[in-house]
Amino acid sequence: MTEVTAKQPGSNTPAQRPEPMIYEFQKENKVQSIPFPALASSIRRDPGLVGIRTVPTQFWTMYTIITGMLRDENINFTEGEFHVQQNSSKAYLTDIEKADGFDSKRAPIDRWRHDKVINLIQIPGVFAGTGIDMRNAAIGLTINKEGISIAFGMNVHECSNFNVLGGTILRTYSYDNGRSGETPWELLMHKLGKWIKGLNQIWNVQNEIMDTMKSLQLPQHESVIEEIIGDLYIRAIKQAYFKGGVTPFDTHELSNFTKEMIQARRAEERLANVWDIYSWGTSIMKPGIVDIGEIANNSNLWADYLTDRFEMNVPDAIIVE
C-alpha cells in the first residue's frame, strides 16, 4: 500500500512550522506505487547538487509530452500507476527532520530521491488482425541511474506481461557497452512524435512478430530448452564477471526463469512454441520480481535473443528519418 499522508503534529514540532506531506515505504514492499504529484515533488537530480548523483530530470516532462501527443492523435489510453523501488530510493533528511521522527522509510515527499521509476501508459483494444481478439498495448517509461527509456510494447490480456518486440525502445543513454548509442533529447522528441503518429504500424509489426513466434513449434524433447538455459547462463556469467554484453536475465533471475520453464514443460506442457518461451520469460519481468529499471530493456533483449536463435525474419517496427 502506498502511504502519502499529512504529518501529525508532535511535541517537538513548532506550531508555526507547516506540516509536510509524507511518503512512506511499507517494510515488506520491495516496490510500491506512488502518486504522480508526490513523484514530481521529489528531489530533482540536477547537475551540481553536492553528494547527489546526476540523473536526467526530464522524466516528468516526458510523461506529460507523451500523454499530450496521445490526446492530440485521439488515441484512447489509460494512465497507469507509477512504481518506485525501495532499494533505489533515498530520503535526504536534515537533523531537524530526523529529530521529528523521520527516517529512511518515512520522510517528507520533497526529501525523497527515487533513482528508479517505471510507468505503463495502457492503450487498450489494439486491433490484432482478422479473426484475432483485440489486444492491449502499452508505452513504458522507465528511469534508472543512466537515464530515461521509452518502450512501445504489447501488453496481452491473459498475463499482462510487457512485451517489447521489434526494437521499439528509445534511450537517453548509451547501452550495452556502447553498442546502442544514446538518443539526444531533440532527436528523441522527433522520433517519439513519429512513433505515436505511426502507432498502427508499430502494433501491426509487433502482432506479426508475435504470430511468427506462435507458428514456430518446439520439439517434444527438452534439449532445446536446456540448450537455451545453458546459453543464457553462460551469457549471464560473462555479463557479471567478464564485462560481456547485456543479457535478458542475470544469474538470479535466470534461476527463477529456469524453474518456471521446467515446471511448465513437465507438468503443464504449455511450452508448445517460441511465443510460450518468450511469455514465460516476461512473466518474471515485473515490478517486485526484477529490477524495475531494466524491465523494458530485458523484455526487448529477450525478444531479440529468441528471434536470432530461431532465425526469425523480423521487420522494422517503424523507420524514422
Image (tube, rainbow, N blue to C red):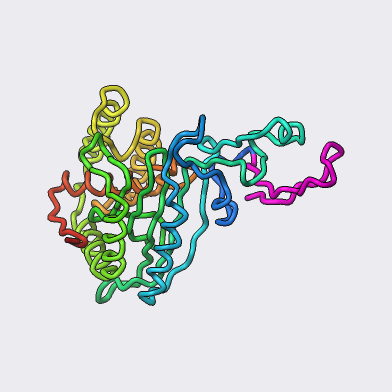
Left/right placement of residue 127 relative to residue 291 reads left
- For residue 18: magenta? yes
Report x, y in % for residue 151: 33, 54
Residue at 38%, 61% in the rendered image? 138
Q: Residue furthest top?
A: 241
Prevailing secondary structure of the magenta residues = loop
Q: Which quadrant holds residue 66? A: bottom left
Quarter of the image containing the C terminus?
Answer: bottom left
Residue at 76%, 48% in the rendered image? 19
Report x, y in % for residue 303: 25, 49
Establish if 128 lies above or below 38. below
The residues colored magenta run 1-26
Q: Residue furthest right?
A: 11
Left/right placement of residue 217 relative to residue 29 reads left
In front of the other: 137 or 176? 176
Residue at 32%, 47% in the rendered image? 172
Q: Residue furthest front?
A: 48
In front of the other: 19 or 117? 19
Report x, y in % for residue 67: 43, 66
